[in-house]
Amino acid sequence: MREDITFKCSVCGEENYIGTRNKKKHPEKMEIKKYCPRCNKMTVHKEKK
């Protein structure tokens, strides 16, 4: 079962991206490196609680 998750910038806290993942196959929180328009650079985005 796929669930929607929100990604939050680890630097400024802006919620920029929405994605999905299978929580049964991947129970750990996701981290991705994406562009943050507020910081104007590539930053690590972590899954929001």
Image (cartoon, grey):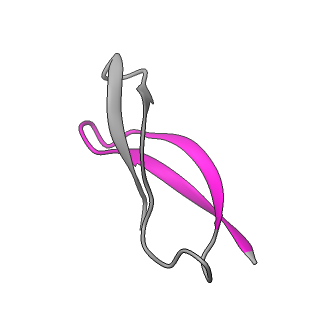
Q: Residue furthest left?
A: 11
Q: Is residue 9 left or right of residue 32?
A: left
Q: Is 3 part of what is drawn in magenta?
A: yes
Q: Residue furthest right?
A: 1
Residue 45 is situated, as x and y percent measured from the top left of the image, at 39, 44
At a point 31% along the width and 43% down the height, the residue shown is 13
The foreground one among 20 and 15 is 20
Q: Residue furthest bottom?
A: 24
The residue closer to the viewer here, 39 or 21, is: 21
The image position of residue 7, as x and y in percent, is: 48, 49
Q: Residue at x 63, y 51 (%)?
A: 19
Quarter of the figure with residue 39 = top left
What x and y, as percent, mark residue 43? Answer: 32, 33
Q: Residue at x 35, y 25 (%)?
A: 42
Question: Would residue 19 appear left or right of 8 to someone viewing this image?
Answer: right
| Location of residue 34 in the rendering, given as x and y in whole percent from the top left corner | 44, 33
Does residue 4 lie above or below 18 as drawn?
Answer: below
In the rendered image, the quadrant that contains the N terminus is: bottom right
Q: Which residues are magenta?
A: 2-21
